[in-house]
Image: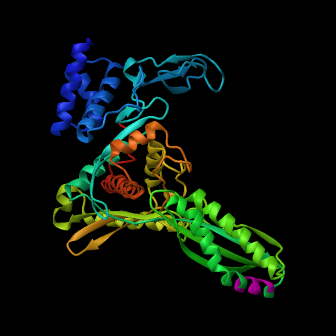
Amino acid sequence: MAMAGSRKAVDEAVAMLEAGEMPPWKVEGYLIEVHGLAPPEQFGLAAEARRQWIAKRTGIEFRHIAIPETPYKVRYVCEHDRTTFELDAADTDKRCTLCRGALKPADSSAERYAPLVNNYVGGTEDYYSFAGSIRLTGDCDGEFQILLQYGTGLGPIGVCRGCHMINRFGGARVKVGQRASASRCVGLIFGKEEERERALKVIGGAMGSLEDRLRKILGKWDGQPATVEFFRADDPHSFFLFVEFTADFVNYRGHGAISQAVGAVKELVDAELRKHSIEVEVSAIAQGYDGDLKPSPRNKRGRYAAAEVHVPLASFGKYFECSAERLLSFVRLDASGVEKMGWFHHTGMGGEIIAGMYKATKVNPHSPLVSSLERIYAGVEGDELVYGVELPNVEAGTLSCSEGLIPPPGREALRIMGIDTAREFAACLAAQVLAGEFNLSLEIARERLYRPRQD
């Protein structure tokens, strides 16, 4: 298509998105059906239309999140055994991974090309999808545009649909902690129980100087000491003492800060025990107890966040084409299955959404394992159905600093999304998980998912 024709097609697509006449995931089809584009022409123009539409909504242009020359994937088959591959069109390695035989493009041009990801808006190695606009009320107010690096599948479209449904009923009602926690634990092993009890008294008596040391180091990161707790444990041959320190932070993750601070405290503890001639077999940072990368219902890392949608029972069945009782029954069924498997929370697709948001924004830490702990709940309150999710351990630092660099595309994604603080990140994360889970629960309850394809 000529340059002028391309510009006209993009402008018209943007106008339709602005008017709400077309969902963002249908732009590619619109460009083919209305403007006569032939694959793979539509993919780059569709991404550009979505980018311009988002820029108009946010006032922020895409700069670091770029569109490559060939923003689509190509389907190939191995010449030997017909194994199917899908490769980024920019990939120059056209050899089978298994046998190194030549890969040939799929026979049908209609099946040969596909988007890098659904709702693609940019990215040359990690692909960004637009995942909806969500309104938040409660502890965090505002409207946020969400970008995910979700990967292959319909996830971003499902999240978009969930956002639309939630916005129709007043937006996501969020609860989010003012501050986030980080923890580190000093672990001590004694050969005699009486030595452990002496050590406990000595450490308790020195707590003033220990907290002063903590406060001095944590202050550089806007952190402050929160709690100190003592726990005993035994095995057949030894007596353990855990001394767990937690600290609170506003916008930093605090992982490095608490590690430095408790490392310094451990030196003071060791010196005090030597001073009082207390025999210690082992003194160490006890990572097994401090929740580092371990999802747990008692984990003290991160910030609590929750989001829920309230739908009047009187309009539920008509709008969703599904009874409230059927949705609640599905949630009970799924929760029972999770418990039977031995997990402690009802988790759904939230782990994928959470990982997608961490990848998109490149916040600290880049791995969201602790933050992926999730609980889904649903019930009736008065004349409303309430569907919600809890994320008890959202561990995220949103500042690019010495605790972790956030590269330019990640910082740009945060700006476009409208996220300035770690608290807003946690609130948006909970709302996005709510959107995805609510849509997924409805689709399964209505039996619209996991059906055989009609050839």
412 or 401, nearer to the observer = 401
Relative to 256, 303 lies left or right? left
Residue 440 is covered by the magenta coloring = no
* Place of residue 100 in the rendered image (x, y in percent of width and height, measured from the top left): 65, 20
Q: Quadrant of residue 20?
A: top left
Residue 198 is covered by the magenta coloring = yes
Query: According to the image, what is the colour scheme of the structure?
Result: rainbow
Give the residues in magenta.
195-201
Relative to 215, 178 lies left or right? left
Q: Is residue 176 above or below residue 365?
A: below
* Place of residue 16 in the rendered image (x, y in percent of width and height, measured from the top left): 17, 33
36 or 334, nearer to the observer = 36
Q: Is residue 391 above or below residue 359?
A: below
Q: The N terminus appears in which quarter of the rendering?
A: top left
Relative to 102, 50 lies left or right? left
168 or 349, nearer to the observer = 168
Look at 80% across and 88% down and name the residue there: 194
Q: The C terminus appears in which quarter of the rendering?
A: top left
Q: Is residue 296 above or below residue 129?
A: below
Q: Main secondary structure of the magenta part?
A: helix
Q: Quadrant of residue 424?
A: bottom left
- How many labels were placed on the picture? 0
Visible residue check, residue 53? yes
* Place of residue 208 in the rendered image (x, y in percent of width and height, measured from the top left): 62, 79
Residue farthest along the top direction in this orientation:
2
* Place of residue 393 in the rendered image (x, y in percent of width and height, measured from the top left): 49, 63
Q: Is residue 101 above or below residue 186?
A: above
127 or 66, nearer to the observer = 66
Visible residue check, residue 235? no
Look at 37% across and 51% down and name the residue there: 420
